[in-house]
Image (cartoon, coloured by chain):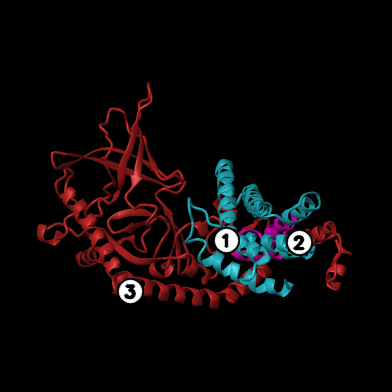
Amino acid sequence: MTSLLFIPVMYMAAVLQTSFATRWDAFGVGPNLLVLGGFLWLTQTGSRRGLLVAALAGLVSDLNSPAPLGLGLALFAAVAYSVIWLRRRLNLDGFPAQLSVVWFAATTITLWQGALIKCLGQSPAAWSALIERSALVGLYTMCTALPILVFAFWRRTPQEQFR
Amino acid sequence: MQVSDPLDQRWLLISPAMLLAATWAAALALAFTPQRITGSLRDAWREALRPSLVALSNTGDWIGNRWAEFRCGDSRLPEAEQKIAALNEQLRTLRTQLLLAHSDRPPGPPSQPHDLGQPPPLLIAQSISARVLGRQAQMFLPPRDLLDVGRTKGATPQALVLDDGAISSASSISSAITSAAPLLDQGHDAAVQRGRLVLAGARVWGKVAEAGPHTSTVQRVTDPGYRDLVQLARQQDGRLHFAARGMLVGRGEALCKIEMVEAADLVTVGDLVFTVDDGVLDAPLLYGRVARVERKPGSTQWEIWMEPAVEAHSPPTQVTVLRMELNPARLAAADNGE
């Protein structure tokens, strides 16, 4: 996959995040499409460029939200680094592993983002609500990733030709 | 792992730790970039998103209309749905008015004071219609920032804010919290002021939290920090009996709490909650309905939870902001007297 394709993908993710994610909300939360785009890219491409791509997704997330600029960039990069670190020790090429990566990234990033914003005194949300919200965002993002991953794995599997 | 792509081979020379350090350095630099620059960056990003958002919105509308046509063979369904919503609102208002007409509260200020030989009232209520802006609409407005200083630190309205990180310790807080608050398309230009009641029909939705030049934010009844004096009314034998008064408190939950109601007062689930008569409005406005009542052993006060009349899952799209102003008829009468 060429890295340049990442730009329109992130742009579309940002547009959908702004317009549709709020309409699809369940229990007050929506999927994080930027995490989905960034980390699916990271899991699908074997290269270290994935870290930079995930960090760029974080920058887009920063520009899309009223949170302090740089917060998303740092968090996405840190979580992408931990995924690369895990990849050296575990096999993350399987379907459940890639789905878990999306869940882990969405939950961790939402939790840390919320915690840091709370520590900066910009949000009065309770810690319990923060944890609950992060878990739901993680779950929702993972569910959104499901059809994309199914399609990606189906494409990867060699198709048997009709004789 | 064998890497065939020469670009990937070059990437292998950079360790992930180095990449992480570089991105963290960039993030730190961004965090300390002046608000002026980051604001322009965000504006440019919004401008870049705008064409796609407009196209997506138009496509969504087109699909919605086609779906409506497919469902009932008529594209006027959204219009009919709006009409039904307006009629339901009217029905709710009439029901409340009917209840109030059969209540034991003293009549409000006379609507035709001249006929009774009384002077016109000093204050009159005016209503300002406003639309509630959606998230997409909010994206097209320039963002407003909040400062973490107030009157206690010497800040006054119209005071200049210097954009100098070295002088100002007031960190600019991007409107993270206010963005969650509903935004109205009327502000100071329509004489909207802070603290004014925001109504959905005859039901109270909240108060104006902050009024800007052209927009204002709403603090909903359920939002934390919302407080107002209320009176409870019990329905009995087809009549409405006003009895207890209390303090309505929003707690960021679905139900609001009503405090300071003495245990000696009669309160039951289903009692209606209204604004307290202030001598200006003809009739009190509906806040909601008592959903839960408890009394702890030994306590002298009730613990009351109220379900707001404006449901959280169906926020209004059109509201009215109440404004009090001096009655010109009264002022004219005073001038003539002189």
Asked whether A52 or B116 is in front, the reply is: A52
Q: Mark 3 points at which residue?
A: B69
Q: Position of residue B26 (x, y in %)?
A: 77, 63
Q: Residue at (76%, 52%) from the top-left corner? A: A91
* Identity of the residue furthest to the front in this view: A163
Q: Name the residue under label 1.
A: A147
Magenta includes A69? Answer: yes
Picture quarter containing residue A94? bottom right
Q: Position of residue B285 (x, y in %)?
A: 27, 51
SS class, disc 2 = helix
Magenta includes A62? Answer: yes
- Residue density around tag 2, few if under 14, some if 14–19, many if 20 or more, within 10 Å: many
Camera sees residue B266: yes
Chain designation of label 3: B
Q: Residue at (76%, 61%) from the top-left corner? A: A51
Up-down: is B251 above or below B64?
A: above
* Dot 1 or dot 2, earlier in sequence: 2
**What residue type is disc 1 on?**
Pro
Q: Residue at (50%, 57%) from the top-left corner? A: B180
* Identity of the residue furthest to the right in this view: B13
CA distance for labels 2 and 3: 47 Å
Q: Where is residue B211 in the image (x, y as percent from the top left)?
A: 45, 62
Chain designation of label 1: A
Image quadrant for the N terminus of chain B?
bottom right
Q: Give the colour in which the image draws chain A.
A: cyan
Magenta region, residue range? A56-78
CA distance for labels 1 and 2: 24 Å
Up-down: is B9 above or below B15?
A: below
